[in-house]
Structures are given as structure tokens and as C-alpha cells.
Image (tube, rainbow, N blue to C red):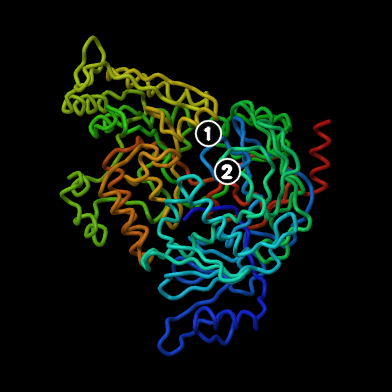
Amino acid sequence: MIVKSQYPSCVNTRALCLLFLLFCFSGVTYGGINASEEAPGSEKIVISHAIAMHDQPKYPSSFAHFDYASPGALKGGDIRLHAIGTFDSLNPFITKGTPVDRIELLYDTLTISSQDEPFTQYGLVAEKIEYPEDRSWVIYHINPSARFHDGKQITASDVAFSFNTLISKGAPLYSYYYADIKDVKAINPLTVKFTFKNTTNKELALIIGQLPILPEHFWKNKIFDKSSLEIPLGSGPYKIKSVDAGRSIVYERVKNYWGKGLAVNTGLYNFDQIIVDYYRDDTVAIEALKAKQLDFRYEIISKTWSTGYDIPAAAEGLLKKQTIRDYSPRGMQAFLVNLRKAPFNDLKFRKALNYAFDFEWENKNLFYNAYTRTESYFTNSELASSGLPQGRELEILNQYKNQLPETIFTTVYKNPVTDGAGNNRQNLRDAQKLLSEAGYSIVDGKLVDPVNHKPVVIDFLEKDSSFERVLNPYAENLKRLGIQLNIRVVDISQFISRMKIHDFDMTSLTIPQTQSPGNEQRDFWTSNSADVEGSSNYSGIKNPVVDALVDLVINAPNRSELVARTRALDRVLLHNYYTIPQWSNISHRLVYWDKFEQPTVAPSYDLTFNVGLMSWWVNPEKAKKIDALKR
């Protein structure tokens, strides 16, 4: 699954029309809107306000709001956020250009994920979801009240147009994500049907609901796959008020938003304006926050979190620091290498790079012991592999035993460990042994590649100059192995452009994950995506076993099988040393000026790092006090 922005729906349909449509198009007679009945000789059909990947939705059709949203939230006020770098596009759906931050606030989707369940979709534009027990197709019944910002009704034709456009002209993710969808058909103006290629990919009936709905009449005479700063038309809770190209954008709440009365919009989207200012780097953004030019920051730098906010306003309680426990998988934050280039296509070379990274020293001296070393691509979840494979996971891996590293079956994956004292001698000896076994030699203090007989030089592509403090100790250890690491810091736009075309030797990146991995894994790992510009298979992995395991994950019939298959995939990725794992923690770190109120419950699985920010609201009296400080 991919997590988008959050909206839901719980609006009653016109029962007589729905009964007629169901009779015409499914051949099944129903006794109620949420019926799950089975006529003699026909398949079981479900019609519901929501659909869960496994088990049943948490919230019934009569629910009033998500638990992490407050019905008493006040509307009004502004929040000023930040982004790093710049932007040159208001089209986030294509590979060209650098899209502006928070643009997803413009677009409604057929359904929306709840953030306190592993994977359940609730109706938004689609007020009802209809599907057979085998999930071979899904029909969405569009809310008759759904409107674009220009007042035009959202129709099935818009949905079909959105799907076909994103598949043919959007970023590669869409074609991989929706690869198993056979076709889309607008049955009538308010009913759209998606038919699937198989009945094993159970996720399809949920993820197609995440499709952002584009207005066909707006895009009809425009070039979709060209980056542009033309303000687009949406249907979501916010629209664009103003744009200062590359520097800032202002979103304003749509006062007559068609979906404001829906159940799980209750308590959400409370700010009248969301202002996003762009800064050169995090250092400048942090100073802007302390100078009251920003209202909120999700802190990613451990040193800054520990020492960077020791200012009078924090001591007085006006500048708040808050941690929120995160229960979602943390994904893999790592040093990525480009397998398309030598010597990174050599497993022993990649493994040696891991031995050169002294995490324990860096955690102690640079990170204030804030992190733990990442040992899985699905850290902080039951999906993470551990120990040696056994049970169902072992059965799966045994099918590919002749194609896998022997260590998968004999050795528990564990990153190299040091005592943190800065003496990485033993690990460097182990790295030297691996390099020697792979045919590398030392000539005049430099490691020489056995293929092209040239010294090994790595260009490290980085977007944040503050990360150099992390890279410099690593570069020193690599130098002791005879490897030269050159750090190339570029602006965010150049970084994004180069990553799209996979133009790098080595970089630092996070590969996100969810509680319900599925079709997006094709874009992350499979051979077909490796050489596609704009794909998320940044490392260029081409491994037939990985391909097979990704298919198994996508087609998992139940939760227990999904867990076993994902753990098998995790294990194969780890033992091939495609990355040098970095670190993670299990808390969100927030810094903000004390002008906000929050619901008593935070979402468990907010993968957008908003930590439920769209459920916060401005306290007018607190805001006056903070505003007075700015004068």
C-alpha cells in the first residue's frame, strides 16, 4: 500500500437507485446498502462504506470521526511550515520537474486510509464500495455531492480519465502499482468499475481507491506530462491561494468544500491557511523556526534535537518539544550504492563497505545515542525478519535455495559492531579480507579494482551539507581500506533530477514501508523497474528471486502469509548487501510554537510524518501570545 493524505466518507446513498444499479450490473438482489448476501448460483457480493486488507474495518458505517480527530476542533488561523530546496512544478504526478510540497491537499481520492489500522480504506469520493468475495473487480459508487473546486460534479469519466492518464503519462510508480488492473469502465456517470487480471492480488481493491481524481475538463487541452506552474484544479480541502515560484506557496481552506460534512473529515483540515516557505537547508530552517518565522518542524537531526533549541522561549514553555511514539515500519534508511556501476555489482565489495561504517562511534559522538542500528527493511514491525528462517518462511526460501547466498540459511544477519571507542580495526581487517577474496589489491596505498586495474574512487551524492559530519568519519575508515570517498553536495533540485535518472555512485536515502506492503514493491526492487527513469529501484536491483518474492508478497492470501513472505523478501535483500543500513528510532520528534491544540489520541501509523498535523488546530488566545513575541 501507499499512504496518501487523509479524508473519509460516510454519506447515505439513495437506496432505490442503488438497488436498481446493483440489480442491473451484478445480477444480485440486495436487501440493504451494506448487505453481504449470496443469491443461489451467484458469487457473494459485498457493499460497504470501507474495505480492509484483512479482517474487518475498525469503524462501522455509522462512525462519526476517526479516534485521532477531535469534533471540537476550531477552524481558523494559519500554520507556517517549511520545505528544503526549491520547486518548479505544481504537477506531482510526473517525473519532470521538482513538485511543490503539500500539493496533495488539492486532490481527493476515491477512498482514504485510516491511520490507526494496518490497511483499511474508507470511502471519500466513493460513498460505497462494491466487490465480490474473490476481489476480481471493484465498483465505486461516487457520492453525488462530490465536486471539483469549480463546482463541476466528479464523475466516473473523471475517474477513468485519471487512471488512464496516470498509467500512460504519469511517473513509473503508477504503472507498476496498478500493473494488475485489466481495465476501467464508467458504467454510468456515478459508477465506475475496475476489473483485475487475477484474483490473488487482494490489495488491488484497496489501492485503486488511492487514485487521485483529476478533472478531465481541466486537463483536456493541456499537456499533462510537462512540468508547469499553472495552478491546477482539484477537489480537496485546500486550494492554492498564491505561489512565489521556488520560494513559497500558500494553500487556503476551501470554505465550501464538498466533503466537509463527511464523518472522517470531522476534526480535520482546520487551518485557514497552510503556508510553506522554502529554505536552502535545515540549518537555515531551524534558525527561522527559532526566529518565529515558522510554526512547526519535524526534527530529523539528533544533535539539533538535543542541543539546538536551548533558547529562552523553550525554557518558558513557548517553544514546545514533543515526542510521539510511532508504530509504523521505519523502512530502510541507508547508504545506497548503484549496482549498475562497478565495483558496486560485487557483493563482497558491498559487504566490505558495511564493515567500514562505525555506527556505534557515530551514535555516541554525533547522535547523542538517539538511534538504534537498522537490521531490517521493515524495522519496527512484525514484518521484519530475525534469527534464522524457520516454519513457513523457510519453506518459501527453500524453493530458491540454489539461487540464494548460503548465509541466509546458516547465519543470522547482523551488522558489524564496534565498542564505540573509535577503534574499528577488527572490522576493517574483515573488510580487507573480503576485498582480497574478491581480487582487490593495494597499490601505493590505494585499493585497485581487479577488473579495470584502477584505484577505487566513490562519489557520494548528498543534498544536505550538514550530513558531511556523518560522512567524514566514514570516509576516513574507507581511506584506511584504500578507497577514496568524494562528497558531492548538490542542491535539492539537482539531487532529485540525478536520482530520477539514477546518476550516482552512492547516496543516503530512506526506502519507506507500511504495515501492508504490496504493489509498490515492484517499483522498489524488481528487475523490470531497474532501468526505468524515475523508478524507485534506485540501486538497480536485478534478482530473479527478489522478483519472485515480490510477486508472492503482492499476492499473499492472508495476513500470516503476508508476514512470512515479507520476512523472506527482507532476508534476501539483507543478505545481498544492497545497502549499508544506517539507523532509526521509534518516535516522532516535533518542535513547535505553543499556539496549537491537539486531539488526545495521535495516529498510530502516520507514514507522511505529519503525525496527525491535519487534526491540529489553532488556539486563538495562545496564538495572540505568540504573535506578540514576533513584534
Q: Residue at x 65, y 68 (%)?
A: 143
Q: Residue at x 68, y 61 (%)?
A: 265
Q: Say which of 559 and 27 sits in front.
A: 27
Give the residue pinned by disc 2. 92
The residues bearing labels 2 and 1 have C-alpha atoms spaced at a distance of 30 Å
Give the residue pinned by disc 1. 302
Q: Please indicate whether residue 285 sits to the left or right of residue 368 in the image.
A: right
Q: Can the viewer see residue 87 in this picture?
A: yes
The C terminus, quarter of image: top right
216, above or below 301, in the image = below
What amino acid does circle 1 point to? Ser
25, above or below 91, in the image = below
Q: Say what secondary structure mark 1 lies in.
A: helix
Q: Say which of 219 and 293 sits in front.
A: 219
- Residue placed farthest to the bottom in the image? 40
Q: Can the viewer see residue 315 in this picture?
A: no
Q: Residue at x 75, y 45 (%)?
A: 273
585, above or below 338, in the image = below
Q: Where is residue 439? Give x, y as percent.
A: 17, 24
Callout 1 crowding tier (Cα within 10 Å): few <14, some 14–19, many ≥20: some
Quadrant of residue 346 within the rendered picture: top left
Q: Where is residue 115? Give x, y as percent.
A: 56, 58
Tell me whether the residue at label 2 lies in contact with that at label 1, contact meaning CB atoms closer than 8 angstroms: no
